Image: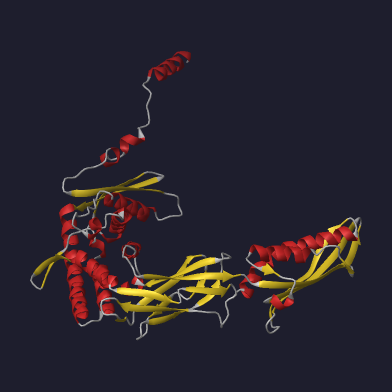
Amino acid sequence: MRIPLLLTVLLAACSPKVQAPDPDSLKPAWLKTTPYQDGYYTGIGHSVKSGDNNYIQSAKKSALDDLVSEIRVNVSSTSILSQLETNAKLTEQYQQVIQTTAADEIEEFELVDAWEDGNNYWVYYRLSIARYKQIKEEQRRTATTLALDYFVKARAAGNTGDQVLAMTYYFQCLRSVEKYLGEAITINVENREMLLVNEAYSSIQSILDKISVKTDPSHIVVNRRISQDSPTAIAIVTYKDKNKPAAKVPLHAAFEKGSGDVFPTYKSDESGKAKILMNKIGSRELEQTVAVKVDVNSLAGSGLSPLYTLLTSTFNVPTAQIALQVQRPVVYVTYTEKSFGNNKANAQITNKLKNLLANNGFEFTGDKSKAELWVDVSADAEKGSITGSIYVSYLTGVIRVATMKDGKEIYATTLDRIKGYGLDYDKSSVDAYNKAMETLEKERMGEMLETVLQ
């Protein structure tokens, strides 16, 4: 019985070892080497089977992004992008946007193969280069037809003297062929051959060059607290060549230096004028500037793409400035700060408030007749309970702001029973005052400034 057993062991020891197949050997050839098919763009996509995602759709998107990366976006040397040599960013972003959006627009791509293992999924797509170019050419022709229609309407509006309408149509012309700004689209108008995009762009700039924007007055002394009787400026829009008002011209106003709230959009009336409305000055700078310019984005229409917005930013737009000399609000301060009914040696909350107001562009005076605002602070700490060696105090305070002109209260806030702790009542009162100052700075100061400066 022992001999057969020994023989079995020896035979087992001499048997060849069976190895598991190499996982990579099971993968298809297109996963081992980047595939190339003559006449096709190809793309390989991958997704991990995490159980909480649609890995098939994820792999498909990845494959199409890979496929699109093979599509090269060329910029013609005679296109508008090439003419704007100083704006390399425009050309770069054009190429990026066209390539990025192509993945959402490509049609008639084919699934070649798919492969998966326990944790991964791969997919292989291809797109006929010839068919892709054919589809893009059809889309280009459709866009060009629409753009040409807008171009002809723009010419007609310009010939009748409606320059604003002409610019609107020229902008619509550019929007129609937005995806083809890098191409040289040739058209024939009135027996003259021209580059459509270049001609539309230069026509817009030519009209803008004929428009003048001025402000009256161009310099304003204004208090940081804007009121109904604060001085304002008028934007005056004219046509230089005709020396007459330019009506219905859209304008945009914004702080160029400093900050604040200025009503942004306007349209010049029949006399070419628009009143610029400022609601708030947010910066404490003494010299600030509001710029008023022709609003080309309004002429271009709503829902502008990043690429188109970048294109409109390249125009040389008529602009005027309003120089603001900002006066700081002058404040008169009164206070009563107590601890357990007795006046404190120092006015902690008041000093903190004055520091915060000074840092936000306010000035102070001891002469009530010279002040615009009256700030009154009252606070007192009362004794609370004693737990072991811990003493509790409660601080209640009120801060009021009123206008000196009419005594009208414009802001009030309460610091209600802020709790302080200490080893005696004096220390707990100090703790309550410190917490009150923290509450003032972090929670109340913002709303106070928002109210007082509006």
Horizontally, residue 149 falls left or right of residue 271, namely left
Nearest the viewer among 348 and 415 is: 348
**Residue that extends furthest to the left in the rendered view of this protein:** 191
Q: Quadrant of the C terminus?
A: bottom right
Using residue 260 as the reference point, say whether residue 274 is left or right of it: left
Q: Residue at x 21, y 43 (%)?
A: 36
Question: Residue at position x 78%, y 60% from top?
Answer: 434
The answer, for residue 176, to whether it is visible in the render is no
| Farthest top residue in view | 3
Percent x, y of residue 81: 25, 58
User: Number of numbered discs present?
Assistant: 0
Q: Quadrant of residue 406?
A: bottom right
Q: Residue furthest bottom?
A: 270
Q: Is residue 29 left or right of residue 452?
A: left
Q: Nearer the viewer, residue 188 or 138?
A: 188
- In terms of depth relative to the viewer, which is nearer, 307 or 281? 281
How does the figure colour the protein chain or chains?
Answer: secondary structure
- Residue 189 in sight: yes
Q: Position of residue 43 (x, y in %)?
A: 27, 48
28 to 152, vertically: above or below: above
Residue 387 picture location, percent across and down: 90, 59
Find residue 8 and report its image quarter.
top left
Residue 376: % across, % down? 76, 74
Q: Residue at x 54, y 74 (%)?
A: 221
Query: 121 or 184, which is in the foreground?
Result: 184
- Left or right, 246 with respect to 51, comes to left
